[in-house]
Amino acid sequence: MAKTVLVIEDEEAIRSVIRAFLEDAGYTVVQAADGEAGVAQFRACRPDLVLLDVMLPKLDGFAVCKILRQESRTPILMLTALDDDDNQLKGFDALADDYIAKPFSMPVVLKRIEAVLRRAGGDDPANRVLRHGAVTLDADGQCVQVHGQPVELTAREFAILRILLENQGRVISRQRLLDSVWGRYDPIDDRVVSTHIKNLRKKLGADCIETIRGAGYKIEKEN
């Protein structure tokens, strides 16, 4: 299956060039012209890799990178004309996987993409299947099983479970779940998260989701 690359870049000419090269190389390309649209597209399509410009309208690339990294380990390559050390360090502090200065060579960008996907294990389908005890979540198939039996979850329940499984051993705050699943600009009462967690526990029939009082929720890492 073709890998999907999300290109978040405000200059249409650059987006067009990147898209042409990537599609010729066999990638599926999704585009966004500003930071907010980029975050929304990421949540909608869950790409295999993100090419992210730094100087974006609405939300700059550093802010977008931090939001995406809170939600996923998807590889992020930052593109920018700001190639000084301070900005590169800022990009890496935001947990970008690589940093490409403009102007860039598209054949080099393609090689960087291939290298980052290899490092991330992007060619291994097993990385899209998350497990904990009897619970199995297939990110590509959008399905969950417990003891091999399918469990029907709502889209938001699925998204919450995926975030917790991707971050086993880490406490995930209610606010982070709200930002990731409902969107950081939706005025939602954080008690809705508690309701979804309660429903998840009931549907899974397994008490693997731990409430950390005053902090959030966690699925403990298995030994």
Image (cartoon, rainbow, N blue to C red):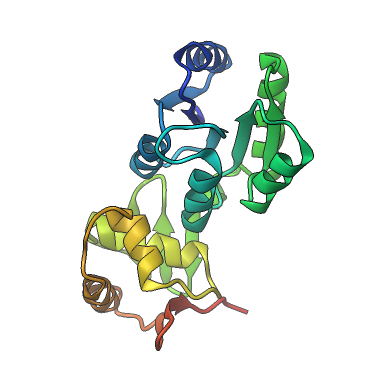
Q: In this rendering, would 149 be left or right of 98?
A: left
Towards the viewer: 191 or 34: 34
Please state the horizontal and vertical placement of residue 66, each as a whole percent of the image.
Answer: 53, 52
Seen from this angle, which residue lies furthest bottom?
213
- Picture quarter with the C terminus: bottom right
Q: Residue at x 52, y 22 (%)?
A: 27
Q: Nearer the viewer, residue 209 or 172?
A: 172
Find residue 30 and report its horizontal and vertical position in percent. 41, 26
- The residue furthest right is 85
Q: Is residue 148 visible?
A: no
Q: Is residue 62 left or right of residue 37?
A: right
Please tell me which residue lies in front, 82 or 51: 82
Identify the residue at image location x=21%, y=64%.
Answer: 188
| Picture coordinates of residue 20, whole percent (x, y) | 51, 11
| Residue 38 seen anywhere in this rendered image of the structure | yes
Q: Is residue 190 left or right of residue 19?
A: left
Nearer to me, 200 or 82: 82
Residue at x 54% of width, y 18% of height: 26
Q: Is residue 138 left or right of residue 20?
A: left
Q: Residue drawn at (48%, 12%), measured in percent from left and top?
A: 16
Looking at the image, is 208 positioned above or below residue 56?
below
Residue 179 coordinates in the image, percent (x, y): 35, 58
Number of on-image labels: 0
